[in-house]
Image (cartoon, rainbow, N blue to C red):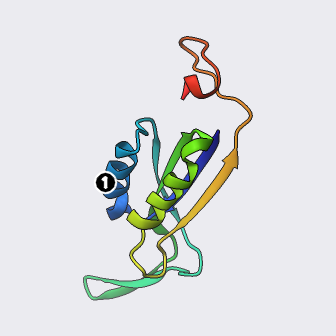
Amino acid sequence: MKKVEAIIKPFKLDEVKDALTKLGIYGMTITEVKGFGRQKGHVEVYRGTEYEVNFIPKIKIEVVVPDAIISKVIDTFLEKAKTGNIGDGKLFIYSLEDVVRIRTGERGEAAI
């Protein structure tokens, strides 16, 4: 099993979520986050006053998937979250030792 953490642009969330659902992935955790990478923020104008925005709003999606479909999941993120512009985000893929569903005690892929 793998855990995928994706940092994407907020307006891409629905497109990514719908594509993952079509792959059979129904459980995911979504978090609104802020950060920056090479973008290093930007300048905005509000009521005629310029101010610097150092932390860009992003969405973090966390999903746990069986090893058998990890490449499809990665490809889905790459296809659906990409705009071609700076700040499209990152994927982090982790190997998981085990998963346990608290309610039933199921373990492994049955707990996903």
Which quadrant of the figure contains the C terminus? top right
Residue positioned 51% across, 70% down in the render: 55
Which quadrant of the figure contains the N terminus? top right
Front residue of this view, candidates 43 and 29: 29
Front residue of this view, candidates 50 and 66: 66
Disc 1: CA contacts within 10 A as few (<14), some (14-19) or many (>=20): few
- Where residue 89 appears, x then y in whole percent? 51, 68
- Where residue 20 appears, x then y in whole percent? 40, 48
Residue most extreme to the left: 47
Instruction: State the count of labels.
Output: 1
Residue positioned 40% across, 36% down in the render: 26
Residue most extreme to the top: 104
Residue positioned 44% across, 58% down in the render: 76
- Where residue 100 appears, x then y in whole percent? 63, 22
Eyeballing the image, is 106 above or below 40? above
Q: Which residue is mark 1?
A: 14
For the residue labelled by badge 1, is the local secondary structure a helix, a strand or a loop?
Answer: helix
Q: Amino acid at mark 1?
A: Asp
- Where residue 12 appears, x then y in whole percent? 35, 62
Eyeballing the image, is 108 above or below 65? above
Quadrant of residue 48 in the image? Answer: bottom left
Front residue of this view, candidates 39 and 108: 108
